[in-house]
Amino acid sequence: MAQKKESFFWTSYSDLMTSLFFIMLVLFILVIVVLHKRMEVTEHQLEEIQKVESSTKDLSRDYFTYRPEYKKYVLNIAVRYPIGESDINRIETTNKHEVLMQLHQAGKEIEKFLYNHRENQYLLIIEGQASLDAYTLNYELSYQRALGLLRYWTNQCGIQFGRNCEIQISGSGDGRLDTHSMRELNERENQRFLIHILPKNIFERNESK
């Protein structure tokens, strides 16, 4: 009788170990499958981000210079304002009409890019900067200059950036607060605009798959 009980115990124990083995095997396979899918999604996200970054680099070099170390575009049109001024129609230059036309064309370049990639959602940040001078409100002023550029594009040039674009206005001032913004040694060159075009929907779209 004791021998039968011992035989039954070892048979049950063997069955239990076999069941646990298969459970662990199934769990192991599930973990591998989940990790593989996550790696596929991550690789796909990276490919799409690289594709978007490459496409934005196609913006005309006549108007934009890409600075890879900052991941930003400089609007390479020299804009010189009187101290404390933010109205773009009051820029100081001997060829004001030509500069305004260049700004117009730069806005059209962004409009064309957003239209050509209308399947994606973007965040367009227009960042103003100011030169370091005696004016004490350059942070507010840099914001107002960026806002003035957007108003020029939309109100005077009739540019529409499309429904696939959220627009934000920012001002990074004159460097006085040491915010680590991109700055040039020649302070007059810091009277400029920086443009950010950031994809918004890539991660959401891939995570929903």
Image (cartoon, rainbow, N blue to C red):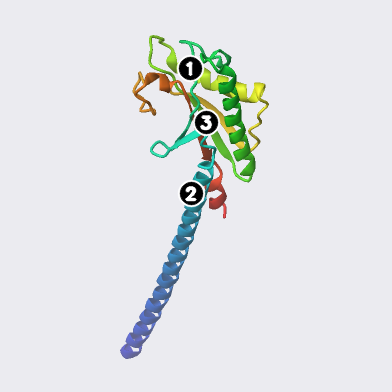
Q: Seen from this angle, which residue lies furthest right?
A: 158
**Which residue does the image show at 56% across and 19% down from the upper left?**
148
Q: Give the left or right position of residue 103, taking residue 68 as reference.
A: right
On the question of residue 26 being in view, the answer is yes
Badge 1: how crowded within 10 Å, few (<14), some, or many (20+)? many
Can you identify the residue that label 1 sits on? 80
The amino acid type, in three-letter code, at marker 2 is Gln
Mark 2 touching mark 3, by CB under 8 A?
no
Which numbered disc covers residue 50? 2
Residue 125: mark? 3
Badge 3 local density, few (<14 within 10 Å), some, or many (20+)?
some
Foreground mark, 3 or 1, reads 1
Say what secondary structure mark 1 lies in.
Answer: loop
The quadrant holding residue 90 is top right
Q: How many angstroms separate mark 1 from mark 2 (CA)? A: 35 Å
In the rendering, at what x and y percent does residue 172 appear? 43, 23
Q: Amino acid at mark 3?
A: Ile
Q: Secondary structure at mark 2?
A: helix
Image height of 118 relative to 146, above or below: below
**Amino acid type assigned to the residue bearing label 1 in the image:** Arg
Residue at (52, 49) in percent of width and height: 51
**Image: 59 above or below 137:** below
The residue that appears at 57% across and 49% down in the rendered structure is: 205
Q: Earlier in the sequence, mark 2 or mark 3?
A: 2
Q: Position of residue 179 (x, y in %)?
A: 36, 25
